[in-house]
Image (cartoon, helix red, strand yellow):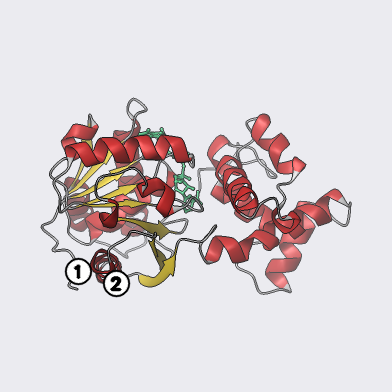
Amino acid sequence: MPALSPSDIIAVIGAGAMGAGIAQVAAQAGHPVRLYDTRDGAAQAGIDGVRHQLEKRVARGKMAQDEVEAIVARMTPAASLAELADSRLVVEAIVENLEVKRGVFAELEALCGPDTLLTSNTSSLSITSIAAGLARPERVAGLHFFNPAPVMKLVEVISGLATDAEAAETLYATAAAWGKVPVHASSTPGFIVNRVARPFYAEGLRLLQEGAADPATLDALLRQAGGFRMGPFELMDLIGHDVNYAVTRSVFDAYYGDTRFEPSLVQQALVEAGRLGRKSGLGFYDYRQQAQPAAA
Ligand code: NAI
């Protein structure tokens, strides 16, 4: 199946860390992009954040200013879901909550034409469940980017029980055309990467709880001696503890409480305290004195 054409409109719902990054990827590939968020001003703030990241590349001599202007000009904030109706592809990147996502997909189905591909950037929720109850579940799939979306190459194209093979192929070809490395996966809890990554976080948290070493020591060890790009604590701070905790809970529940995936009380406490990591300024580390994370 061919990739979507650059003239096709891409809609992104949720202008947080992931949504803004995915919108940037699509706009850089030449698509007109509409970005929608229920939080007032969030979509425009997401677009401003993309400009900020791209201008850092201009400062480093890696991009021309007129390229930045062209990319940003392709991105428009949408004031309502209805403004996404003529999109060819919707990528949902809102809170990791099945009921909220299902509500959004039901609204999208009522608004969009029959050819619109409806996808979720969910980290762990069942694509089959997100699509259940829709009149046309065959055009629903997972399109799972990694953080930061403009940098990370891998994209999981996830098929639920009803997903049409042609829709999955179109998404695969589109992700490849966007410069990504796509992989097909079926909708199992956590898909591929988030399933394999669970023990990385869980064992790090267990070591911490057992008093083996502090987060900075464990992170440095895994980075310097283990060859990992990031240690588990700095990576959880980047992902956001609300998101990562929701993913752990969803994988744990999906595997009927298998203790391998048991959520950590340390992480639960961070979420309860609002210490969500980089995005809130405080997590395992304190980011309040430094600029927000670079994403491009
Ligand atoms: P975030 O918390 O940074 O952003 C979520 C955004 O969605 C917020 O701006 C919020 O106002 C908006 N939102 C919430 N409910 C909405 C609704 N009903 N309609 C429109 N907008 C709504 O979250 P983040 O990190 O961007 O994650 C979003 C999704 O991407 C989640 O499903 C998460 O599991 C997934 N994901 C997250 C990764 C990460 O490293 N943070 C990596 C890959 C996937």
Is residue 153 among what the camera can see?
no
Q: Where is residue 250 in the image (x, y as percent from the top left)?
A: 58, 47
Residue labelled with disc 2: 176
Ligand 1 sits in quadrant = top left
The quadrant the N terminus occupies is bottom left
Q: Residues within 10 Å of mark 1 (few under 14, many from 20)?
A: some
* Towards the viewer: 261 or 278: 261
In the current view of this chain or complex, which residue is farthest to the top?
40
Q: Residue at x 68, y 44 (%)?
A: 285
Residue 241 versus residue 168 in the image, above or below: above
* Towards the viewer: 60 or 73: 73
Ligand 1 neighbours mark 1 (CB distance < 8 Å):
no
Residue 58: name its quadrant.
bottom left
Residue 17: name its quadrant.
top left
Q: Residue at x 38, y 57 (%)?
A: 142
Mark 2 or mark 1: whose residue is earlier in sequence: 1
Q: Position of residue 128 (x, y in %)?
A: 41, 53
* Towards the viewer: 201 or 120: 120
| Left or right: 46 in relation to 238 | left
Q: Which mark is residue 3?
A: 1
Determine contact: label 2, label 1, CB under 8 Å: yes
Q: Which amino acid does label 1 sit on?
A: Ala
What is the secondary structure assignment of the residue under circle 2? helix
The quadrant the C terminus occupies is bottom left
| Left or right: 139 in relation to 180 | left
Give me the C-alpha separation between circle 2 and circle 1.
8 Å
Residue 213 versus residue 11 in the image, above or below: below
Q: Residue at x 41, y 62 (%)?
A: 151
| Left or right: 64 in relation to 37 | left
Q: Which amino acid does label 2 sit on?
A: Ala
Residue 200: name its quadrant.
bottom right
Is residue 217 among what the camera can see?
yes
